[in-house]
Image (spheres, rainbow, N blue to C red):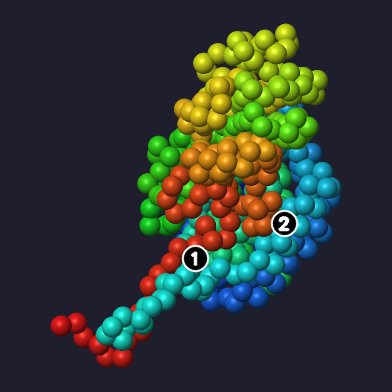
C-alpha cells in the first residue's frame, strides 16, 4: 500500500466520482485494517519503523524543501500574514528538527500494554487495567507541515492509525512529508495505510470526517479558532482540542526585574505565531520596574495595547479595547494591564484565559504556590516563558496538540494521551452468586 497524495481531481474518473463520505469510509477501512497490524507489533518494531521514517525524511530533504518553497510562494501571493508564513516555512534546520523529533518519539517508552493498576478481589479474580491504542485517529490541521510528521510518529508509536487532513496552504509540503514517511514505513514492513493523507482539499471531506462515527475513533483539530470551533460544533466523533492560546504572564511585586524583562520578552517575541505565545501581560502595581519591562517589548517591535495605568508607563502604548483581553493575536501585538496584587491578577486570568498556559514571575514562594494551585489552566508556570508549552520541551517527544479540556487528556498530548485502557480479568472458574 502507498499513501495517496495526489489531489482528487488527478485520480481516475471512478475515484473522482467518489463522494466525500465514501472516500473517508474507504480510507478509514484501510486505516483500521492497518491498525490491526500495528496492534500486533512490538515496541521495538514500531521504534525501528520510526527510525526508518526519520531516515527517509532526511533523504527526501531537498524534495520537501522544494515543495515547501511552492507553498511559501503561493502563501505570499495570497497575502498570508507573517505569522502564518512563519508557521508554514521550512528550512534545513526546521526539517532536521522534524526528523529528529520522529527519532525522539522512537526512543520513548512504548505506552501500549503498560499496566495502570492491578488488584485481586476476595474471590480470587485478578484484575488489571492496561493501556491500549485508541484506534483510528483523524487529525485536521492548517498551515504547519511539521504536524504531518509529528502526528504520524506519535500515532504509530502508540499503535494508532491516523487519517491526516492538512490545510491547502501546506498542500505540497504535506504531500512530500507524507510520501517520505510512507517510504520509511514500507521499508520497515509497515503498511503505509497506517499513515494516510486525505488526497483532496475538498472541504466537504472535513464534514465527512467529523461525522464518521464508527470509522474514526477520535478527531484532533490543530489550527485557528474558526477551525476548532467548527470541529467542536459539528463533530459526532470525540474531539481533543483547544480553541485559543490566550496565555498570560503575571509579573508579581516580588519579581526579579531582570528575570521579568527576559521572561516576558521571550514569552512574546521568540515566536509570536505559536499557541504558547504570551498574549496578555499583567504587571503588579507594586512592581517597581514595569516601565522597563514594557520598554523592552516596545523596543523589540511589539505593539502594546494597555489599560489606563499601563499607558501611563510609556507613551507608545495604545489604548486597549475590551476585545483585546480575549484576543489571541499570534502576532507582535500584546495587551497589557496593571493589577492590584495576586488576587486581582488571578481574577483577570479567570475571566479571560483560555486555560492553555499561564505564568507568574516572582521570588515569593508563597505567591508562586498559590498561583500554581489556584489558576485553572492546563499548564501553569513559575518563572519560565510560556513558550515552553510544548510536548518536546516537556520530554514527551513531539505532541499532537495542547488539550485544554478536563476529560481524557490535558496539556501537551503525546503518547499516553493517545491511548485508552481496557480491563483484563483472570479467573479460575469463579461464578457470581
Q: Secondary structure at mark 1?
A: strand
Count residues near mark 1 (Cα–Cα under 10 Å), then give few for <14, some for 14-19, many for 20+.
many
Q: Is residue 284 above or below residue 428?
A: above
Determine the residue positioned at 51% across, 34% down: 354
Q: Quadrant of the N terminus?
A: bottom right
Instruction: Compare residues 68 and 305 and report the one nearer the observer.
Output: 305
Tell me the crowding category of disc 2: few under 14, some 14 to 19, or many 20 or more residues within 10 angstroms, Cα based. many
Which tag, 1 or 2, sits closer to the chain's start? 2
Q: Position of residue 75 (x, y in %)?
A: 71, 30
Q: In the image, 15: left or right of 80?
A: left
Would you name the residue on which mark 2 appears?
Answer: 101
Res. 179 image quadrant: bottom right
Q: Position of residue 350 (x, y in %)?
A: 47, 31
What kind of element bears circle 2? Answer: helix
Identify the residue at horizontal 65%, vertical 75% (top origin).
Answer: 45
Question: Which quadrant of the figure has residue 55?
Answer: bottom right
- The residue under label 1 is 133
Closest to the observer, 33 or 42 = 42
Q: Which mark is residue 281?
A: none
The x and y percentages for residue 36 are 50, 71
Q: Residue at x 78, y 47 (%)?
A: 94
Q: Which image quadrant: the C terminus?
A: bottom left
Estimate the spatial distance between the alpha carbons at disc 1 and disc 2, rounded to whole Å: 21 Å
- Check the image and name the residue furthest to the left: 433
Question: Relative to residue 95, is residue 352 drawn left or right?
Answer: left
**Residue 159 sits in quarter:** bottom right
Amino acid at each position: 500500500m502507498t499513501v495517496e497524495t495526489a489531489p482528487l481531481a488527478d485520480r481516475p474518473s471512478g475515484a473522482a466520482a467518489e463522494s466525500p463520505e465514501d472516500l473517508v469510509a474507504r480510507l478509514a477501512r484501510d486505516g483500521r485494517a492497518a491498525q490491526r497490524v500495528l496492534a500486533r507489533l512490538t515496541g521495538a518494531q514500531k521504534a525501528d519503523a520510526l527510525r526508518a521514517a526519520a531516515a527517509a525524511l532526511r533523504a527526501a530533504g531537498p524534495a520537501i524543501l522544494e515543495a515547501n518553497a511552492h507553498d511559501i510562494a503561493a502563501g505570499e501571493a495570497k497575502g498570508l500574514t507573517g505569522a502564518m508564513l512563519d508557521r508554514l516555512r521550512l528550512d534545513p534546520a526546521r526539517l532536521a528538527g522534524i526528523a529528529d523529533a520522529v527519532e525522539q518519539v522512537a526512543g520513548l517508552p512504548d505506552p501500549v500494554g503498560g499496566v495502570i493498576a492491578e488488584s485481586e478481589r476476595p474471590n480470587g479474580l485478578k484484575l488489571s487495567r492496561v493501556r491500549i491504542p485508541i484506534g483510528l485517529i483523524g487529525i485536521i490541521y492548517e498551515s504547519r507541515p511539521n504536524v504531518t510528521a509529528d502526528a504520524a510518529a506519535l500515532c504509530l508509536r502508540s499503535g494508532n492509525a491516523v487519517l491526516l487532513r492538512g490545510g491547502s496552504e501546506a498542500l505540497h509540503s504535506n504531500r512530500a512529508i507524507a510520501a517520505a514517511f510512507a517510504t520509511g514505513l514500507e521499508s520497515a514492513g509497515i503498511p503505509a495505510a497506517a499513515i494516510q493523507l486525505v488526497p483532496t482539499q475538498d472541504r466537504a471531506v472535513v464534514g465527512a470526517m467529523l461525522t464518521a462515527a464508527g470509522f474514526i475513533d477520535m478527531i484532533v483539530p490543530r489550527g485557528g479558532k474558526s477551525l476548532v470551533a467548527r470541529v467542536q460544533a459539528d463533530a459526532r466523533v470525540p474531539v481533543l482540542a483547544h480553541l485559543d492560546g490566550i496565555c498570560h504572564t503575571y509579573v508579581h511585586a516580588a519579581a526579579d526585574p531582570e528575570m521579568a524583562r527576559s521572561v516576558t520578552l521571550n514569552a512574546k517575541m521568540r515566536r509570536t505565531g505559536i499557541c504558547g505565545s504570551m498574549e496578555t501581560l499583567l504587571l503588579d502595581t507594586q512592581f517597581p520596574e514595569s516601565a522597563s519591562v514594557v520598554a523592552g517589548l516596545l523596543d523589540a517591535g511589539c505593539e502594546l495595547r494597555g489599560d489606563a495605568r499601563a499607558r501611563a508607563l510609556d507613551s507608545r502604548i495604545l489604548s486597549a479595547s475590551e476585545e483585546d483581553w480575549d484576543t489571541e493575536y499570534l502576532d507582535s501585538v500584546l495587551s497589557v494591564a496593571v493589577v492590584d496584587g495576586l488576587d486581582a491578577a488571578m481574577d483577570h486570568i479567570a475571566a479571560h484565559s483560555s486555560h492553555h498556559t499561564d505564568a507568574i514571575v516572582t521570588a515569593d514562594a508563597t505567591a508562586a504556590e498559590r498561583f500554581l494551585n489556584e489558576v485553572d489552566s492546563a499548564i501553569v508556570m513559575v518563572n519560565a516563558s510560556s513558550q515552553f508549552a510544548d510536548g518536546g520541551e516537556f520530554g514527551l517527544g513531539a505532541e499532537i496538540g495542547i488539550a485544554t479540556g478536563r476529560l481524557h487528556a490535558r496539556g501537551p498530548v503525546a503518547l499516553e494521551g493517545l491511548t485508552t485502557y481496557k480491563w483484563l480479568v483472570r479467573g479460575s472458574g469463579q461464578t457470581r452468586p
